[in-house]
Amino acid sequence: MRIGIPKETFHEEKRIALAPAGVDSLVRAGHTVYIQSGAGEGSHFSDEDFRSIGASIVYSGEEVYHRVEMLVKVAPLSEDEAMMLQDNQILFSSLHLVVGKKNILDLLLAKNITAIGYELIEEGERLPILHSMSEIAGQLAIQVAERYLETYAQGGRGILLGGITGVAPAAVVILGAGVVGTTAARTALGRGAQVIVLDKDLNRLREIDQTFSKKVTTVVANPYTISRGVKFADVLIGAVLIKGEKTPHLVTESMVKEMKRGAVIVDVSIDQGGCIETSRVTSLSDPVYVFNDVLHYCVPNLPALVSRTASYGLNNSAINFISNIADNGLSPALMGDQGLAKGVCTYRGYVCNEPIANTFNLEYRRLHIFSNN
């Protein structure tokens, strides 16, 4: 199969979808891999790193898009990238179509693109590709919050996350006990913070209790407990995920107005719309804004802060799915792996993901795979 890795065009996205080790395994299996020149620079992989293992370096995004059967990306498609897609290609990338632009979805449908979203692929009860990025985001959320608590960080509270003898640590309140929330809790606890995790799922809260030997306070999430937690927080981490759907606003503007002056919000859910009403998308170069004296950090590609680690993480979690499609063909791969099939958003000109279809008032059809594809 001809596989292409273009240079990411999303603002300040420095990750690459596959590290040299993943490209090497594809080349050894007999596949042709085209990589746009400079695609790995943001993660400190040179063109020569890829050329030396048999990849073909090309010098424009258009050439990558025009040559390949399957495109492997990191960030969701831009409109310009969607225009470059060729009929009947396979797209393997983060998609987040439910919060995307309809014209991009229309192009996927018009060009009969099989679009597979990292964030929807399942493996047992896990979301394996999203899992690796969530582990990174959970750690970084605390690292970022710690920085913006400092006095000179645009009006931060001037609080040391872990406190000192005789001085209380910061209160870190985490909405969501999934991978991001659990990793953020572990990181904050390791820094010495007081940590509270809210989730509506009692089983997840029990796992938090067991994992951290009751050193983390767990609370069942509802409007009342969320409101109380938000008021108490020096740091509020939004770590809510509803698979494939836009994240609901669990923290309202009125709740934010009750927060401490100089408190920090890190809304990790922003790539799915954000779980805090006052959140709006920011960037790595301009990551923070202040609303009602509360600092908001809402960067959708937070793992790009550690692009090399994140690229290795993407490579490790995605390569088996990519190899399956490349080695066996699209239809056999989807028929043989139901978890991979659950990642398919568009196929043969129709939407096969119900939340996306409902969001854009389009016809939804269940995925029907043709063995002769």
Image (tube, grey):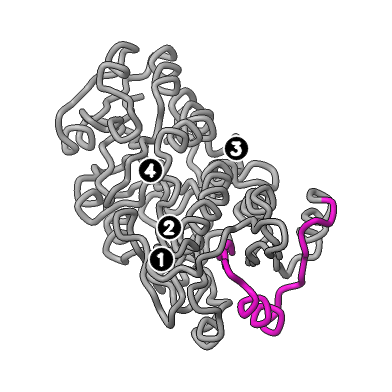
**Residue 2 in view, yes or no:** yes
Q: Of the residues shown, which amino acid type is indicated by label 3?
A: Asp
Q: Is residue 306 left or right of residue 317?
A: left
**Residue occupying image coordinates x 20% and y 45%:** 84
Mark 3 and mark 1 residues within 8 Å of each other at the beta carbon: no
Which of disc 1 and disc 3 is earlier in sequence?
Answer: 1
Whole-percent x, y for residue 152 in the image:
40, 63
Instruction: In the rendered structure, find residue 96 and report the number of the disc placed on it.
Output: 2
| Mark 4, residue position | 74
Q: Of the residues shown, which amino acid type is indicated by label 4?
A: Val
Q: Measured along the vertical axis of the image, is residue 249 above or below residue 318?
A: below
Q: Measured along the vertical axis of the image, is residue 275 above or below residue 16?
A: below
Q: Measured along the vertical axis of the image, is residue 258 above or below residue 366?
A: below
Q: Secondary structure at mark 3?
A: loop
- Rendered image quadrant of residue 21: top left
Q: CA distance from mark 3 to mark 4?
A: 22 Å
Q: Is residue 212 left or right of residue 337?
A: right
Mark 1 and mark 2 residues within 8 Å of each other at the beta carbon: yes
Which of discs 3 and 2 lies nearer the camera? The answer is 2
Which of disc 4 and disc 3 is earlier in sequence?
Answer: 4
| Mark 1, residue position | 99
Q: CA distance from mark 3 to mark 1?
A: 26 Å
What are the residue bounds of the magenta stretch?
213-241
Q: Of the residues shown, which amino acid type is indicated by label 2?
A: His
